[in-house]
Amino acid sequence: MSTLASINAAAKAGQLMPGAAENLTAFLAAQLPAWAGASIDELVAKQAWGELNDRFFRFLEFGTGGMRGRTIGVTTAAAEIGTVNAKGSPEHAAIGSNMLNDFTLIRAVIGLHRYTKKYLASKGDAARPRLVVAHDVRHFSRHFCELAVSTWTQLGGEAFLFDGPRSTPQLSFSVRWLKAHAGVVITASHNPPHDNGFKAYFDDGAQVIAPHDQGIVAEVNAVPLADLGPFLAAKLEGVTTLGFAADEAYLAVAAKAAIDPAVFRKTKIKVVFTNIHGTGAVHSLPLLVHAGCDVRPVPEQLEFDARFPTVKSPNPENAEALSRAMALAEQTGADVVLATDPDADRMGCAVRNAAGKMELLTGNQIGALLAEYRLMKYKELGWIPAAGSPRVCIVKTFVTTQLQDAIGRGHGVKVLNTLTGFKWIASKIRRYEDELRAAMGSGFDYDATPFGQRAKLLQQHSTFYAFGCEESYGYLPNDLLRDKDGNSACLMFAELCAWVKGRGLTVPAYLDEVFLRYGFYLEGVINIYYEGASGHAKIKRILESYRRNPPQAFGDVRVVQFQDFGREKVFDADGEQIPAQDLYVVTLANGYSFAARGSGTEPKMKFYLFASEKVATAAELPAVKTRVKATLEALNKLIEADARTRAEG
């Protein structure tokens, strides 16, 4: 029986989903390279229907982080594995419409180019579309990067790529620095080694949002497989390579993350740093060294490696990923451990506590500490009024700790909550930039205006962005770039640690000061992973059941409010309406709350739990911490059990 006949028979028998059979048929009809056709033949011959369903049930979609997917299958074909290189990369990225591979990547680049060209034409701009592309250390990252710039130039555009792996924040900065019309970074951030991704940026250096995101998706979906053939071999003639000058330009702005560099001269701190085999060492290390820190990298994690061989997951949110760095910190008496993920847009840390042991901090705790310190410092240095101002803001996501809302209120500044994804935080910065440009007139150069002067002008005519973050270890110090920046975050947190040490305190003691000022806040998170086509259906069932049949109680605690961001109109502190999304916020009778959403970058359902309680004295803080933690843990179990029941329908 032929491969096509076997596919049709499997679809008829219900072994292949209709979408998978349709996409498989379309791939076979296209003029595929020999290895790709042979891979499909092999998987069909193996009757690997579950694998084929996962690979072909849909075309890879854009989410909050662009497009992410597996590049290596669970069940693999010999033709796609081919000759494995020294770093463990197969010869070809796995075949499939729902995989990140040559075909889905080229399709995305063609769609992005077509949209960008039409957008420029709509403004009467006849310029060649200009694209800058960066990549991290993952399997196929350099290959995908070269395919992207090759495709772009063959379509008539102008393209730039870096001479090696670079961080996502540098890509965000470089879009503005090069006055590019679009940008792409090839990364799957902290996902497992088998994944890779394609994150699209527009002319402001931020990830695309409406209407651009849907416009790009429409163009991508309109690209037939038959159009991909001419672009499958990379041609780099005419592509500009970026190196030292681009690094120096980015480092100059990243260094501005330190509000008060004199702090480092007053107090020397010892830092252990790990890039967990990723791009962070390219810029985080020089930033810390030039600031005056005594820095020791974790040697066995310093080298780029797509396999991330020393960790289970290259995610600085996980304690295991920081274990080697913490051990080195204990040996050397370091004050702080700083860690970045593979594309260096996230930062995790551990600090020395009063008992002299290293203690991990959560993303919510790091963000709250930075918000409090930076607002305090901005006031101390005269950048913002001592009483605060509604023309100064901090920006966070709805699923980030409510302690930051309290900190903002305490400092008299505006707090804006956005949907998950740093593109929404960047969209607020873009709004303030546009307002200032309009107020200053056509001759005003926003990027060329010194940061201090720009801060004053924004407070006069718009809003000054003082800080932004999200709970998943993402932080952005200022508006000099438009995505979370793990390199700058390392410098920001090192400054805070030096200041705290100069006061004779530990960072956990400073966090307790914050709790005594604003109340004790504790957060939790539930991640429920559901892989493949069946997992996609389970996540969808949870989301749909929440809307159709909202929870009424958890144990003996009633639900008193259910907010559906997909059906209700929600407005931020600027009066702007929040775009509709499958996000639910549930408030309980005891004052605790949680948010529920499907991840935009990984195959999982996420729940974010929030608890708080007032604290009158330092003496009662330990008891409050214990009580709140126990209540939150019990709630965690009830929410997860309910979600798993909903997933099964």
Image (cartoon, rainbow, N blue to C red):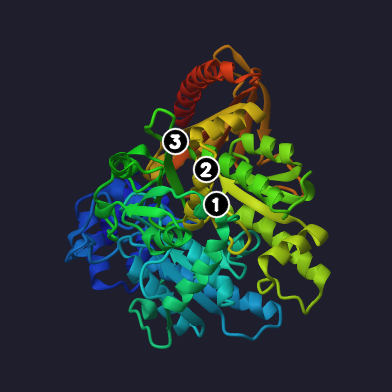
Choose the circle earlier in sequence order: 3 or 1: 1
Q: Nearer the viewer, residue 381 or 481?
A: 381
Residue neighbourhood size for the residue with mark 1, other residues' Cα within 10 Å, grouped as few (<14), some (14–19), many (≥20): many
Residue displayed at 49% across by 41% down: 501
Residue 513 lies, in percent from the top left, at 59, 31
Residue at 36% of width from left, 43% of height from top? 334
Q: In this view, does 32 lie to the left or right of 377?
A: left
**How far separated are the C-alphas under marks 2 and 1?**
8 Å
Mark 2 vs mark 3, CA separation in Å? 38 Å
The earlier-in-sequence mark between 2 and 3 is: 2
Instruction: Check disc 2 and report its element: helix, strand or loop.
Output: helix
The residue that disc 1 covers is 263
Crowd tier of the residue under label 2, counting other residues whose Cα lies within 10 Å: few below 14, some 14–19, many 20 or above: some
Between disc 2 and disc 1, whose residue precedes?
A: 1
Element class at badge 3 = strand
Q: Check contact, mark 2 vs mark 1: CB within 8 A.
A: yes
Using a 10 Å C-alpha cutoff, classify the residue at mark 3 as few (fewer than 14 neighbours), some (14 to 19) or many (20 or more): some
Q: Quadrant of the N terminus?
A: bottom left
Q: Which of 54 and 15 is in front in this view?
A: 54
Amino acid on which the number 3 mark rests in the picture: Asn
Residue shown at the point (69%, 53%) measured from the top left: 381
Q: Nearer the viewer, mark 2 or mark 3?
A: 2
Q: Residue 527 carries which label?
A: 3
Residue identified by numbered label 2: 502
